[in-house]
Image: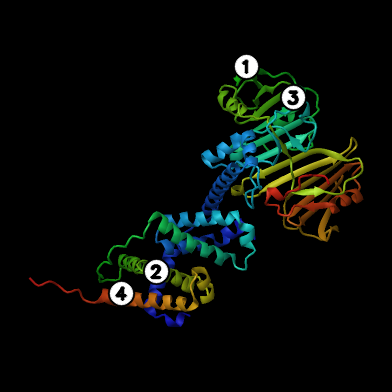
Amino acid sequence: MTNELDQLDHRYLESLRRRMGAPVDTLALLSGAQRRSRRMRARSYAVRGLGGAAALAVLVAGGAGVVRALRDGSPGAIVGGSGPTAATLHAPLPPVANGASTAASAIGTDPSLLHFTVPDLVTDSEVTTWISVDGLEGVGFRKDNRWAEVSIARSEPALDGLRDWHTSSNGDPYIPGTPTVTPPSPPPDLHRSVKVGDVTGMLSSWSNPPESAGNWPYLRWQPASGVWAQIFGSFVSFNDAQPVVDIATTLRLDTVYRCVVPFELTSTPTGARLRSCHLSLFDRDAGQGFSSVLTIGTATAELRIESSPKRAEPGGSPTTTIGGHPAWVDNSNGTRLRIPTFGELSLEITGSGDYAGLPTVKGVAEGVHVATDIEDLSTWPARTIG
Amino acid sequence: MTFEEFVYSRGAALVRFARVLTNDDDRADDLVQDVLANVLVKWRRVSKTDHPDIYVRRMIVNANRSWWRRLSNRELSVAAPPDGAAGHDIAHHIAERDHHWEMIAELPVRQRAVLVLRYYEDLDDASIAEILDISRVTVRTAAMRALNTLRERHVSRLAPTPRSTQ
């Protein structure tokens, strides 16, 4: 092809190459494309949401999300309709009911559901974590290097039980499976009342003095009768209540969300029930897309099923195979079965107590059905246990 | 291949291609981001095509056309080529290089695109035809015309400039 080129042509093409060879910031390109795509999707949802009577009903129920999507282009996926598409994983969980304020008695009773959200923060968050366990529900998020965890429960002691967990996690996402029914924490060391909308909340600290190392301020208030809420994290300052109050006033109890994971368990031990559901979605700009943990069990047995995008297989020969996928067994603490590539997922299943036997763990692993497209939240199974 | 992997592996080439099409770095970045945002929405479908890269390049070409029309964001003619100066110092070399680029920039968009795809990306005529939505014959013709134009302009630039008599 280059035979037709003479020396002059080569000089021109060299100039062309130099011109084209200027550095390209691929990361910025990716971020920009993702940001624009989210805006496009938000506009698309908004238009779709305004298009029909059914969507209009949703608009009434979830109006804030739609308005937000229209206003600044942030993802407002609570509008419903078809779910987010590939690489738009960072979206709110799918709602299962809109409009009615949750009865306090429902909170924390079903680990597959969450009865609240903090929509503004969830949609803009770099990392969002949802968790629902017996007696407690939580949403955690990170934004601009700040983080907070918002929890609701039917009683204050359930929130007190978070003290040790919060103060030792350094802001890491919620870790499910942590016992939530723990002895009540000591009374807050410091506290002062603040107004959260129409109700009076208490801004407290778990240590003394405020704003020193080891100080853990948090806000607690009652967003509705019989419901206690708490915000803990770097948004909370004992001296400046406004940032955390701003978050608190956006908490909503009018939509029920389903905690989903990118797989369904079709084979579980008899008597095992869902004990916790945990999902973290990471902004795609930051790399990894998600991690999830389900725990199922009884009073004397537990299975912990963790998933994330598939990983490279470790060195060494696999111990066994699950559905043809190489798997490694570790018996150092219960029975842990690692399957780095299970379709598009990496799975880790740990059995303890009565479920510590390898046959039990393998039985659960063999019954895992992976979502059609792990990057598309709308294809994730609606049920965690089939 | 995930969308991210695609952008990491092909993004730079796409931007460079867009730079040649638009002759404007900022506009090229903007154009490619817009196109990739569209691609992202339908990535599952795009990734299943035989040649996602060609598909996306074609989107860039089309987007450039439509954007160009929509915003009337017409290309600006570059300044007239400077007179050739004697000497072989670095400044002269850079000036020559810039001049070469200016000559290329004056070519019609299609001819520039063909040059890039043919001689920089080493794509075959069939792929170039698909990207630009033209026939293979047109690809060859465009390449030939582009090179001929550059040669002619170079010759005319070297020709002595008539001086006015006083």
Nearer the observer, A299 or A247: A247
Residue indicated by mark 4: B153
Residue A174 in view: no
Residue A223 lies, in percent from the top left, at 67, 23
Residue indicated by mark 2: A15
Q: Mark 4 and mark 1, same subunit?
A: no
Q: Which residue is drawn at 46% across and 64% down?
A: A21
Mark 2 and mark 4: Cα distance apart in space: 15 Å
Q: How crowded is mark 3: few (under 14 residues within 10 Å), some or many (20 or more)?
A: many
Closer to us: mark 1 or mark 2?
Answer: 1
Instruction: Name the colouring of the figure.
Output: rainbow
Q: What element carries label 2?
A: helix
- The amino acid beneath tag 2 is Ser
Mark 1 and mark 3: Cα distance apart in space: 18 Å
Closer to us: mark 2 or mark 4?
Answer: 4
Mark 2 and mark 3: Cα distance apart in space: 68 Å
